[in-house]
Amino acid sequence: MAAARNPSRTAPPTPRRDGFHLISNVPIDWDKPVPRLGTYAFRDITYSKSSVDAAARIAFDRAQVLHAFTPTTIREIQMALEDATDDPYVGVVILTSNIDAEQYTPAFCAGGDQTVRGDGGYQDGTEIAPKLRVLDLQIQMRRCPKPIVAQVRGYAIGGGHILHMVSDLTLASTNAVFGQTGPRMGSFDAGYGCTTAAALMGQKRARELWFLCKFYSAHEAQAMGMVNAVYKDDELDGETARWVRRMISNSPTALAGCKAALNAAQDGAAGISQMGGEITRLFYLSDESREGRDAFLEKRAPNFRSKL
């Protein structure tokens, strides 16, 4: 008698074989917030890590102004992101906002705080951030080798909208609203703000976004290519955790390499430089690289072929 065929080998193809639906969607259990880095205490953001889920959470904390950012806000995000990048126990970074729906309109970030915008740009008079460095933050986010997930509730408009676009992934609540406001307020972002929009949704849609300054619902933004997935508001934290856990289970070196390669396709020489940096970092771990170092220190000719 012929052996019974394994049903799993004859089952029809299904995307559920990837096991994503089996990953826990229990919200991430965050450790106590990191109130300060060195001697500096955060004022405009909160910064947390999860030792269980190997993730970091950077959250805007200016709900009274729809989380609009000042130079200080951006500098604090840069500091937190640098710390998360350097922490080997952090694999994924979540960029989000602290929501106080009972007192304030929900928002991810409403862009630059116009109350500190002067003739020469945004200035809030602080020593730590004399000028707005949001373009530097965008570059830092691109060069971070770890996936950055924008978790969006409420308004993501203006400069806040650009930060979500520059993030690697965007997960949105059904109450999220996306759009650009710059040209209506005498402002624009001719760097990643325009180029990333075009890369995500195509030239026609990107021009619509910037020329008309329209707002879009979460589902509209998803259809345009700006958002990866939309969830009910009370499910967003759990589903974000599911995405994070899947990425954490993957090879961090492979993720870094994929991110660098994807960036290189858009960033030209700067992107190729980033990818080259990742390749160099990996090469330093090889026997061939160590042979070159050791030969120099031992004052002998290297024998690279013996290490292949």
Image (tube, rainbow, N blue to C red):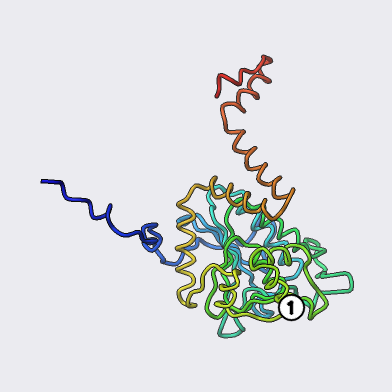
Query: Given the current orientation, which residue lies at the most extreme left position?
Result: 1
Vertical placement of residue 157 versus 263, above or below: below
Residue 112 in which image quadrant: bottom right
**Crowd around label 1: few <14 · some 14–19 · many ≥20 (10 Å):** many
Residue position marked by numbered label 1 in the rendering: 181
- The answer to whether 18 appears left or right of 7 in the picture is right
Q: In which quarter of the image is the C terminus?
A: top right
Vertical placement of residue 135 versus 187, above or below: above
- Nearer the observer, 70 or 21: 21
Is disc 1 placed on a helix, strand or loop?
loop
Vertical placement of residue 89 versus 166, above or below: above
Which residue appears at 62% of the width and 77% of the height? 107
Vertical placement of residue 30 versus 209, above or below: above
Which residue appears at 54% of the width and 69% of the height? 171
- The answer to whether 287 appears left or right of 8 in the picture is right
Residue 79 in the image, given as x and y percentages of width and height:
68, 57
Residue 37 in which image quadrant: bottom right
Query: Given the current orientation, which residue lies at the most extreme top position?
Result: 300
- Residue type, numbered disc 1: Thr
